[in-house]
Structure formats: C-alpha cells, structure tokens
Image (cartoon, coloured by chain):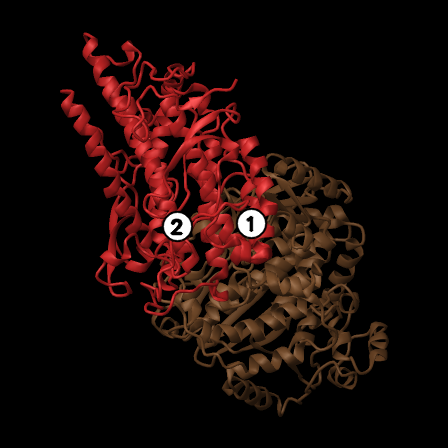
Amino acid sequence: MAASDKDTPAPIVRFDTEPSRYRHWQLTTEGPLARLAMKVDDTAPFRPGYALKLNSYDLGVDIELADAVTRLRFEHPEVRCVVVTSALPSCFCAGANIYMLGSSSHDFKVNFCKFTNETRLALEEAGDRSGQRYVAALNGVASGGGYELALACHAIYLQDDGSSAVSFPETPLLAVLPGTGGLTRLVDKRKVRRDLADVFSTLAEGVRGKRAKDWGLVDDVFPKSRFDGEVNKRALALAEALPAKKGPGVKLPPVAVERRDEGGKSRAEYRHVSLVVDRAKRVAELTLRGPADEPATSAEAFRERGVDNWAFALFRELDAALLDLRFNCPEVGLIVARTAGEPERVRAHDRALLALAETDWLAHEVVLHMARVLKRFELSARSIFATLEPGSCFAGSLFEVALLADRSYMLDAEGGPRIGLSPANVGPLRMANGLTRLETRFLATPARVAALAGEADLLDAAGAAERGLVTFTPDDIDWEDDVRIAVEERASLSPDALTGMEANLRFAGPETMETKIFARLSAWQNWIFQRPNATGPRGALTMYGRPERPEFDWRRT
Amino acid sequence: MSAVINSDKIPNNVDLASDKKLGRALEAWQPRFLDWWREMGPEGFQEDLVYLRTAVSVDTDGWAHFDYTKMPDYRWGIFLTDRVDDRRIGFGDLMGEPVWQTVPGEHRNALRRLIVTQGDTEPASVEQQRRLGLVCPSAYDLRNLFQVNVEEGRHLWAMVYLLHAHFGKDGREEAEGLLERRSGNSDKPRILGAFNEPCNHWLSFYMFTYFTDRDGKYQLLALSESGFDPLARTTKFMLTEEAHHMFVGETGVGRILERSCELMRKNPSEDARAEGGIDLPTIQKYVNLWYSVSLDLFGGEISSNAASYFAAGLKGRAHEDRYPDHRALEQSLTLDVPGEGLALVKQDVALRNAMNEVLRGEYVEDSQRGLDRWNKILEKAGQSFRLRLPSTRFHRAGGIYAGHHFDPEGRPVTREEWERRSGEWLPTAADEAYVKSLMQTPIYEPGKMAHWIAPPAKGIKGMPIDFEYVKRQA
C-alpha cells in the first residue's frame, strides 16, 4: 500500500455528473416520492484494478449519490420522500469496495471517507431541514457502508426473508472500523443499546429479521411479498406529513471552469472564484469575488436568476474548487483565502437572500447549501489563512471564510480593507458543532456575540482587531514580509501534526453527532487504517481475499 | 461413545442421557420437527406402512436395518461415527494440531454458517418433493422417495444436534429457523437457489437425487475433513445414507433411458414421445438444468470465504488425504474468467481461494462416471445419441460466469443468442407440461410400472420387485 502512494500517479478526480450519465444509480420520481435505486456497474470502477461486486461502492458511485442528493433538493421540490433501495437481487449494498481501499493511498482513502460522510450528512440534513426525507428500503444484505447509508436515512426497513441482514463486518473481517459514522449513528442517533451494538459490530454475518427490529437496528421488517407495498405506504405517509413547496425546481447545469497552467502554477478560473495552485510552494490562493449586481428581492426574480444568483453560483464554484483541492492537490498544505469586491454589496445580497429564505424554499435551499460548503471548507485538512487586503469584501457570508480560517491578516492602512457583519453571521451558517462561527470564536465571552450582532457599520483593521475579529493587523510596511513569512513557516510544518492540531482547535464548543463522526473518523479510523494489524504486510485488510490468514500484534495501546 | 444406538426417546449414540440440558433442548425441538414433518413431509402417506431402512447401530452392517414403519414413527436420531483417538487437523494453517471437540470462539460464526447452510438443504429437499408420491411411477419408486425423505429428515437432525450441542442460544434459534423457512416461498425461502427450484415430477426428482444430492455428497466429504471433530464425525455418517440417494437418481434416469430406447424401437421414426415416453433430447435438457443449478451450490470460483475456511481448518477438500500437500499455499489454479465482451481470459487464482472450484472439479468427474453408465445403456440399445454434461460455464447463476451467457459447450454467446436458443438447451414450459402429462396418475399396485419407465433390475434388500413396499392405509 505504501508503494501505491508513490508509484501510481493519481488520476484527476472530477465531480460533475448528472442523472443521464449515472452508471450506478437509477433515479426516478413519481409525485412526492423518489426512488434512488443502487445498481452498481461492476465493470466501471473509478480506477481500474477492481470490480464493484455486490453493489460495493467507490468514489465514482458516491459522486453520483452526492449529485442525486443535491439535485433532488434543487430540481425536485415536489419530492418529499426518497426511497433508497437496490436494483440488484438479494443485495442492498456491500459497502465500500475492499480491494479499492486496499489499493488506495492513505490520503485518498481519508478524503474518500470524508466526502462519503459529507454526502450522508447532506442526506440527513435534507430530511431535517429541507422537507425531503430519506427512507432506506433494504431489500437485501446491507453490510458496512451499505448499512451506514441506511443509518443516515430517516427510517430503515429490512426485508424479512431469512437472508437479508444488516451488518458491520469491518472489525471481525477486516480489522478496521465502519468509516462513515456507522458506530456513532448506531448509539447516538438510533440509540441502540451499547452492549447490543457491541455484539452487532463484531458479528460479521450481521443481524436479520425480528432481532434487527428488536435491537433497534431497523425500524421495521416485512416479508418479501409485502415489502415494496409496506415501504411505499410508509414513504407516502412521511411525504404527506411534510408541507408541499411552491414553485418549480431549478436545473443545475455543470459548474463552468477554465483551467490553465501558468509557469509552475495551475489556475482554475470560475465565474466568481479563482484557484491558483503553486505546487512548488504547496500553497493555493483562493479568491472569492463579491457580487457585481443588485440582489433579487422577490421569489420570482430569485427563481428566474436560479443558479446565477450570486451566492448560489459562488458557493457551487467554491464547493467544486475545494473538492478539486482535496482530491487533486494532496500536497498543497495551505490555502490563502482572499476576497474581491464591495462589502456592502455582499451584505445587501445576504440580507435579501435571508429575507427570501423565510418564505421561499429555493432561497432556503441556497442558504443550506452555503452552510454545507463552508463546513466542507473547514473540514478540509489544509491550513487556512485569510488575508484581508484593499479591495476585499470580507463581509457577511464571505466574512465566514475569515472566521473559519485558522488565522487572518488584515492590512491596517489608509484606504485599507473593511469588514462587516450581516444576518448571515449570526444564525443560518452554523458549524458542525451547532454554533455559529462567532459563537465558537467567543466561547469565553458570549456577550460579545450579542454585541456584534448589532454592529451595523463596516470596520477597519483597528476596529476589527479591537473586537477580536481578525488575528493580526500589520501595517503596509510590515504586511508583505509578515504574510510571506507566515505562509512559508506554515508550509514547512508537518502536515500530519497540522491536520491534528487544526482539527482540535477549529471545533471548540459542544459535540454533536456530526463533530463526533468527523473527529472519530480522523482519529480512530485513520489511525487504525495506518496500523500494521490492518494494513501491514500480514494485516487483515491486506490479507482479505488472499489465501493466508492475518496475523495480529496483540499489544493493546 | 458407542456403536450401538440406544432406545432413548431420541435414538442416539452420543450418550444423550448423560447430558440432561442437551437432551431437554432436543426433546423440546422434537415435537416441532414432527409438526414440520406432518405439514411439509410427503403429502397423503403419513399413515402408510413403508418398508424403510433404519439405523440401529453405526457399524458397517448395523445401520441398514429394514422393516415396515409409518414415516412419522421413523427413528430419527443422532448418530456420529466413532471418535478416532488423537485425530489431528489435516490441512490448513493449523495442520497437525489436535482437532477441536468444542467450537473455538474464533470460528464460531463461520462454523455455524457452514452447518446452517448444510442443514437448510435437508428439509428443503423434503419440501420440494412432498407431492411426488401422488404421481409415483411404482410402489418401488414410492418407497425409494420416502427413504430419501426420511433420511433427509435425519440429516436435519444431525445438523440440529450440532447447533444445539455447540452453539448455545444462537444455535437453538437457528435450529428453529431450519423449520421455519420453506422451499420456494419467496417470503421465507431456503438459503440456496437449487433448493427453491420446483421439483414437481419424477424426471426432475431423479435428476435432483443424481446431481443435487451429489453436491451434498461433496459438501459432506469436505466437511468430514473438518478440524471441528463433531462435525467431521456427523457428516461421515451422513455420507453412508447419501449414497443411496444418488443410487435412486442414477437408476431412475437409467430406467427411463432404457424404456425410452424400447419405445423408440417400436416407433417407425424412433419417436419416443409419440409412444408416450420421454425422448432423449428432453432428458438431455433436464441434465443441463439440474447439473447447472447444482454446480452453483459449490459457491464462487474465486472465494475468500473458501480460502479462510481452508486456512482455519474448518472445511477441507474431498478425500484430503489423497492430496500430496495439505497447506495449499504455493499452488494456484488457472481459471477461464470472463473478460471484455465475449472473451475469456486465463487467470491464476491462489489455490486456497479456488477451493470451491477444486471441490466442483471432483464433482464434475464423479458426475461424468454415472453419465458414462447411462450412455452404456444407450449404446447397448443401439442408439447413437449420447448424454453429455454441459460446460461448467453453462447457465450459472452464481460465481464468475453468472450474468454471462454460454452455450452447453461453454462458448460465450450474446444475450440475444441465449434468448433465442435457450429453449434448445433447457426444458421449456412445453417440455415441463409434457413430462408432467405422463405422470398424472399414481401407480401403487406392487410390481406395476408407469409406461415411461422400465422396472428396476432388482428389488430392495433381496425382496422381489413386486413386493408390497408401501402398504396403503387409505
């Protein structure tokens, strides 16, 4: 496995797709119900070298799932319940493909798991906040990641046919852990008793039928002859309990981007976003451009602009740029974030959007999307510095980028940059811990958050520093050196130590299921994945499918 | 341990009387088994007296004791071959270590799965065959059917004993499950595909006992090598009974062939169907069907489960002692694996991962031997037609060939060709209807045979062919 880190040049990963190009999923809608059926094309792995047997998945399968979940929200507002099921006989989903994991580099595996987790959370959030609930119809065996997908759904129904089961075979068979929040959701979300969860998680063949229901692993079981009918009835009831949305959906076109190489740097130019990667320095410069137009102030006008509404467009592009960085630029350790534009315009767009979001589902969806992209940003295992320079527009929703950065530098000069807050900073764009970034920043002094919420004016460097909103405010004599040295110093530190340090510092405050999932993925799962008992020459993951049996180092830490 | 089977409530040679807990558990299971037998066993013959073989001891001769018995009174019991002193694990990573008398925790789930999968086939075949008595071709055949049925019932007992004795509460629940699943019921199907296929006429019954019970033989041979000694000893004894089932299948098909040849001679255009018999091409189609669904029972050609069962000493090869090397770490097996389009590509598979294929290979050879004897019948009758085993790639629903199409010679064909031609290779609805039309009325009169089958060469246990093998009480 170590060899593959260096030997195989990682192919470029792209995330654009749409239902007519899906190889692995069938998406159909009928009235308030959608059916998302998994039928993985085993001959179409994301990278050559393994077959996706038994609805096992890899990044390619999950990219399509993520696309479907996003499109259902924006393109199908009429859908209020999504039934996730399998179009293969007697198999729901076998989870992440073992041979894919065995042949992937560590950073790819981690990013794959993280992306998969983000999709699971998005699916969960659609049920909680978008009036679009997911129901898992397990018409076959759901093991590992397959059951984890089900766990992210609002309800789980299992076919009672003597062979369909739910299982977590990771520990007994592979000596690793379920990688997409399964263990956490078992006890935190479904509140399965921990002793039963312990038994379940060491039983490779899993649990079937009535016992699965008794243990709380599924919500109900039905015999095969009644399964589709019973699930449909419940899905329809769930859908009908949710309010219908007004107005048609908005089609999501591909995110347009132009890429070019500029003497050792590669540039990706989107409409509102630029990403310039300096591979030698291992630094990416990210620039977000503020709006040039006036915001839409009516639901009709907002819908007419659709994906061209500034915030919608910018955050879709930012999402694409972040995924590009994660998967295609593993050696870039530091993102320097900048903005360009007029702070007041950003604030005007925020206010208009949030006002619309109170009554219009599409505006509400756009706000949720922004929140998800910002979370994706701070969940990226890269250092983030924000530099606030003249002509920048770190205001409102874009100031969230300065807040999520590990530190920020704001030029203190005549005609220098100014920042400002908007309603976007005090509620709608919450972090994984359930708090706003301001609340997380000022855990020691909650009163300051309330005071800042009333701050209507733009602030210069001195004002921002006084309120604790930026880290450093060098003047124009020091600026260039200070920023350069900070960047160079950061890029020289151990990437592993930085990842751990940043994750510890970024998510202060309360734990939520979401923070637990990511923290445990980063700490436990990734640690176990690196240990010889899993991936050493005689580790269980290495030996899986081979004739010999694994050998363990029995010492506990 | 004793070779003598005692006369306890549950006949056994495992000294059940001294294990009160196990005895109670099995006594609680017994009435449920009888309920199942009455509900799902042979329909309409439960009160009849049947001339059956019953085991009275596990000695070479003692297990073959013949007498009239009502099927529900059959002495289903628990018989293990005698323990071999200082038996050692004969293959895999633990080779040379003493065999286990109790289940090792590490392998508990895998062993339970092996036993439940094997156990599930036993009641399944009884269920599949439960209505065959109503259309039997002779009293002799009726008796053979019931002999097969009661012995499958006893094999269920053998597996249930292991579950009760060694797997605690889970084992008892699995034992219940074995009585709850139903062959062909989509809500609670039997575990393996072939055991949910309908077996509703006698041509299929003979093919089933020839091909599908032969899978059973090879599974039992592989399990009788197990390092889990109670499993090895249980399956060894089951093998003695399984042999009779294949005898029923081989002679049954042989007698049909004989009769078909006779009828062909009578007909100017050698048309057996015109004479009310089963024509040879139709018999070939049933060979193709039952052979291919039975091949699936061996599991995937490339299997990590098979490798780990072998490595752990749970399931060996048939007649493991005939192989020169019992670790099977160095060798590989070359398989033809479906590649792009219709191509087949050679792939070397580590031998342990190919253990299912090794066992299947032995099965193929063994199947061919009986086929050769059938062809001798055709040859003797002056027919040029010969039966053939189709390629192991043909009509597979599991393993690497599933989802691809091959003709009986194993040549890849397109889906279109398969759909166009599969009626030449496998029984069609019309073939099924024809075969069933021959078997509308049962023949219970001793010595009399249905029109489409020849009488057997000899009766059971030295009795004449016209002996009253089943005394109807109705």
Q: Is residue B259 above or below residue A309?
A: above
Mark 2 highlights which residue? B235
Q: Is residue A8 left or right of residue A183?
A: left
Q: CA distance from mark 1 to mark 2?
A: 18 Å
The quarter of the image holding the N terminus of chain A is bottom left
Chain B colour as displayed: red
Mark 1 highlights which residue? B174
Q: Disc 1 marks which amino acid?
A: Glu
Q: Residue A470: percent from the left, percent from the top?
A: 71, 82
Q: Is residue A85 left or right of residue B330?
A: right
Q: Residue at x 34, y 44 (%)?
A: B240
Secondary structure beneath dot 2 equals helix
Q: Are marks 1 and 2 in contact (CB under 8 Å)?
A: no
Query: As rendered, which of A57 and B403 lies closer to the eye?
Result: B403
Q: Is residue A181 visible?
A: no
Q: How many marks?
A: 2
For the residue carrying disc 1, how many other residues have a C-alpha within 10 Å: few (<14), some (14-19), or many (20+)? many
Query: As rendered, which of A535 and A446 lies closer to the eye?
Result: A535
The quarter of the image holding the C terminus of chain A is bottom right
Question: Any idea which chain is the brown one in this picture?
Answer: A
The image quarter in which residue B86 lies: bottom left
Q: Is residue A181 left or right of residue A467?
A: left
Q: Residue B174: percent from the left, percent from the top?
A: 55, 49
